[in-house]
Image: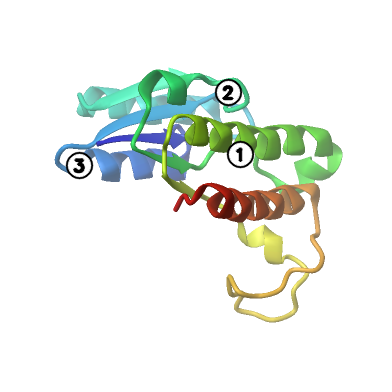
Amino acid sequence: MKVLVTGAAGFIGSHVCEALLQRQGVFVIGLDNFDPYYDVKIKRNNISMLKEKYPNFEFYKQDIRNTTVIEDWKPDKVCHLASMAGVRNSIKNPELYFDVNVKGFIRILEDCETYNVKQIVYASSSSVYGLNKKVPFKETDRINKCNSPYACSKMTMELLANTYSQLYDSN
């Protein structure tokens, strides 16, 4: 089984890759653009460790907005973790957050549809619940207001995931 993990160099992404790589018969394709929002040196170390430790790991330094990895590898499953992070930075750069998070996710979803990838897991964010008064949050909570462009982009991704799932019968 081939699994694509976007955002593979980050903390969560590298740990997801490692957990998958420890499973019998799983080949992992990691994708990351090494965005400098978080320390690139740590990201490079994460990828180096995965490459050294696991022969069933392949890595591509590409951006989700223009990657060809789904077309090239035709994975069985996709775990989409790549996104621009940071609430404060999104207020200063809202267009960048929608370009990367929303347009990038649409690219992944479209490629999955084109190349018949039916299982997609993606990471949202607790930031989408930012203005809800009720704690703890639940996935079923109604979200009427976001507190940042980052949260709004992640909420949009949730809506897109639901839409694509309904349109194309994906999981």
Mark found first going from the N terminus, 1 or 3: 3
Mark found first going from the N terminus, 3 or 2: 3
Residue 30 pos. (x, y %): 40, 29
Amino acid at circle 1: Ser
Residue 59 shows in the view: yes
Structural crowding at the residue carrying mark 3, measured as other residues with C-alpha within 10 Å and reported as few (<14), some (14–19) or many (≥20): few
Residue under the point 79% across and 60% down: 146
Residue 73 pos. (x, y %): 36, 22
Amino acid at circle 2: Asp
Helix, strand or loop at disc 1?
A: loop
Numbered badge on residue 83: 1
Residue under the point 42% across and 44% down: 118
Numbered badge on residue 22: 3
Q: Is residue 85 left or right of residue 119?
A: right
Structural crowding at the residue carrying mark 1, measured as other residues with C-alpha within 10 Å and reported as few (<14), some (14–19) or many (≥20): many
Q: Point out the image quarter for the N terminus.
A: top left
Residue 7 shows in the view: no
Q: Is residue 130 left or right of residue 14?
A: right
Helix, strand or loop at disc 3?
A: loop
User: Which of the 4 image quadrants contains residue 60?
Assistant: top left
Choose between 166 and 108: the one closer to the eye: 166
State if disc 1 and disc 2 touch (CB < 8 Å).
no
Structural crowding at the residue carrying mark 2, measured as other residues with C-alpha within 10 Å and reported as few (<14), some (14–19) or many (≥20): some
**Vertical order, 154 against 134 (above or below):** above
Choose between 72 and 45: the one closer to the eye: 72
Residue 22 pos. (x, y %): 20, 42
Q: Which residue is mark 2?
A: 63
Q: Residues under labels 1 and 3: Cα distance?
A: 25 Å
Mark found first going from the N terminus, 2 or 1: 2
